[in-house]
Image (tube, rainbow, N blue to C red):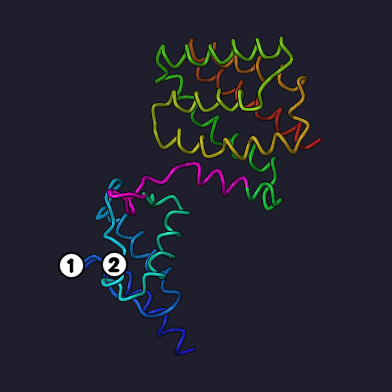
Amino acid sequence: MSGSRETTRADVTAVTALAEPGLFSRVSVGRISEIIVEQIRLLMRQGQLKPGDRLPPERDLCERFGVSRVTVREALRMLESSGLVEIRVGARGGAFVTAPSSDRVGEGLADLLTLSVISATDMTEIRMILETGIVPLVCERATEEDLAGLEAICAESDAALAAGDYPADLSLEFHLKVAEATHNHAIAVMVKSFCEPLLVSRQLTSGTTMDAHGPSTHAHERFTEAVRRRDAGQATEIMREHLARKIRQLSN
């Protein structure tokens, strides 16, 4: 037990030492590459490393951390897979800090959905809470450009239904456009993070039939009309019933 406590203290020390000059501190315990990742991640959270910043070359990182090049490369691969750095090759290459993307969240949720850790109904209930909650902001802030964008998607949906070829992602495009109409980047990112999992959920249910898309398209049109009138109450109710219908479909 004492050895485990010592390792934990050392891990914490390795990370908290970043507050001191020098940025990177040597590591020597635990899975070294993971500790390096945590050091770099903490520097990003503290704002000492920002999107676009280039990390020191591998040789410098090896010296600063006191580890081998293999360990540094493993840490960089972990950061890259997490979407925190981009590895570029060539004369001006290296490891560059990137802004995390909502796609990473969506991929994780899609995996959970595919593996049945969470259900499509669970996902839609989250949508109910999130997407009805943002409607007042949409009604308050939507611009003429936003409204025109929503109406264009509705028109495209009508045409797709008439042609009998409704693309699965068209409805999600509408909901993303609704989120963007809040002009709140955090909301738009959250809604976007559900796009891929929702596509998966449609593939797992009968909601992909053409008969199911008709009521959804009609709901989108009525919702857009209510937003144009700035009627937050009716728009919220339309969105709630629209998503409640989805939940009922998934439960059958």
Q: Is residue 174 left or right of residue 9?
A: right
Observer-side mark, 2 or 1, equals 2
Q: Is residue 143 left or right of residue 219?
A: left
What kind of element bears circle 2? helix
Task: Assess disc 2: are there few (<14), some (14-19) or many (≥20) residues with their C-alpha within 10 Å of its C-alpha.
Answer: few
Which residue was labeled with disc 2? Answer: 59
What kind of element bears circle 1? loop
Q: Is residue 248 left or right of residue 77?
A: right
Query: What percent of the width, then of the height, locates residue 35?
Result: 39, 70
Which residue was labeled with disc 1? Answer: 21
Q: Is residue 137 magenta?
A: no
**Magenta-highlighted residues:** 89-110
Identify whether 169 is placed above or below 203: above
Task: Assess disc 1: are there few (<14), some (14-19) or many (≥20) residues with their C-alpha within 10 Å of its C-alpha.
Answer: few
Query: What percent of the width, then of the height, locates residue 245?
Result: 71, 27
- Report the number of numbered marks: 2
The image quarter in which residue 146 lies = top left
Identify whether 7 is placed above or below 124: below
Query: What percent of the width, then of the height, locates residue 44?
Result: 31, 55
Near-viewer residue (14 or 62):
62
Q: Is residue 109 magenta?
A: yes
Residue at image point 45% right, 33% down: 188
Q: Amino acid at mark 2?
A: Arg
Mark 1 or mark 2, which is nearer the start of the sequence?
Answer: 1
Residue at image point 68% right, 19% down: 166
Query: What percent of the width, then of the height, locates residue 119?
Result: 70, 45
Residue, far front: 91
Near-viewer residue (66 or 190):
66
